Image (cartoon, rainbow, N blue to C red):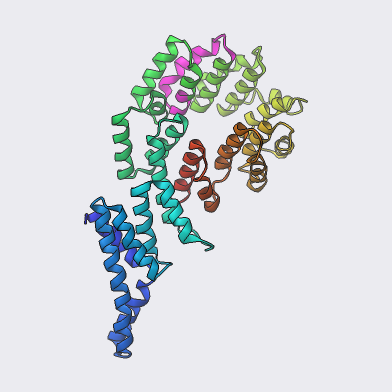
Amino acid sequence: MSALSLLRYVLIVGLSVGSAPVLHGVQATRSSGSKPAQAQREPSVAVEEAVDLTNGWARLAEGKPEQALIQAMRVLQREPRSIGGLVLAVEADIANHGAAAGLAQYEHWLAARPFEETGVVRRIARAMLVEEARQRVDQGARAEAIRALSEIGDPRATREVRETVAVSPVAAGTRASLGDPRAVDALVSQLNQGGSGLVTTIDALGKSGSPRAIPALVARLQDPRQEVRAASLEALGQLGDADVVPQVAPLLADRNMRVRVTAAGALLQLGDSSGIPLLQGLLTDPDPSARLLAADALKSQPDAGWLAVVRELATSEDPEVRARAARLLGPHDPAFARSVLEGLSSDDNPAIRELAAVDMSEVTTTDLTALRAMLKSESHLTRAKAAAQVVALTK
């Protein structure tokens, strides 16, 4: 058994349900000399569990998760609420069949118990992040998982991600969003060359936090495509360099409404309030989509009027508007936001159902049980976001 496995075993035995009474019994017998028969019987239970757990962790270290699971189940058959048996069983299932199997094992053990085992849920979430970092189906989910793993700082997780990247390099956009300066420079070069796919490149540069991206983004404020101008404004707002205010402010008069609204929101992020009158005027626009754009740009200043508008938007006939409004309401009225998104989770449109699920993972930040349920989502992105939330909540 490795040193890490031995340490894990020692911690588990120390926390297991049966161990504390046994140690207490032994200590009491030594100090008072009373009830020797009881003192002889109780340690045998702990010894059996310790032997099974030791053997189980040894089998797991040898790469034999099926045999480790057998040892774990022996413990759980004798003591169904054993934490040591649970942790070994979950680890064995993760090693053998993946994070979903570990989650199923945990939920079977949990049954109707009212309290979560926080450390176990965190372990399952971390395993799920590693799996999402390896998949190639949803690059957005993959990027989310890699970011979350990098924030953990866990050596094993970092090693697994590094090995994954070595086999199939992560896209430059993902690396840039993690702050890799070489990836930032590569994306700046792509942006300067023009062509297609610029919005994705600009989004990654905005998330990078790197000032190296600013000159190229400012240059794109003159792009003839409205989506490129809007994305560049949003990225500049994220980067937060107030020196670009003189370049951003003229776009308050852009011919496209979305660009004008995005410019006003970016200016707010940069500490300039000159776009507020424009946004406040749009909050009364008859078009729900226009009101939503304005509300999103004003989300950093959620006064009573803003909250009233967003609550009204959360009842819109347009399901996408309802979902986006609920996401904006999440930090201020999470219960109402979740109720809106739960209603959308059964929408006839699968795209709306997925949007609601992703937004639900953003809104739900403190409910571990709700986040655990999202780990079973069919959406890669929802699973990745929920797992990242679990890790952040349990750190």
Which range of residues does the magenta coloring cover?
204-226
Q: How many numbered marks does the figure carry?
A: 0
In the rendered structure, the answer to whether residue 331 lies left or right of residue 45 reads right
Would you place residue 30 above or below residue 345 in this image?
below
Would you place residue 280 above or below residue 192 in this image?
below
Q: Which quarter shows the N terminus?
A: bottom left
- Judging depth in this view, the residue of 258 and 40 nearest the camera is 40
Q: Position of residue 200 (x, y in %)?
A: 48, 21
- Judging depth in this view, the residue of 389 and 65 nearest the camera is 65
Would you place residue 153 above or below residue 367 in this image?
above
The answer to whether residue 27 of the structure is visible from this angle is no
| 145 drawn magenta | no
Q: Quadrant of residue 32?
A: bottom left
Residue at (63, 37) in percent of width and height: 328
Q: Position of residue 203 (x, y in %)?
A: 49, 24
Residue at (32, 34) in percent of width and height: 164
The answer to whether residue 317 of the structure is visible from this angle is yes
In the rendered structure, the answer to whether residue 296 lies left or right of residue 51 reads right
Report the magenta stretch's main SS.
helix
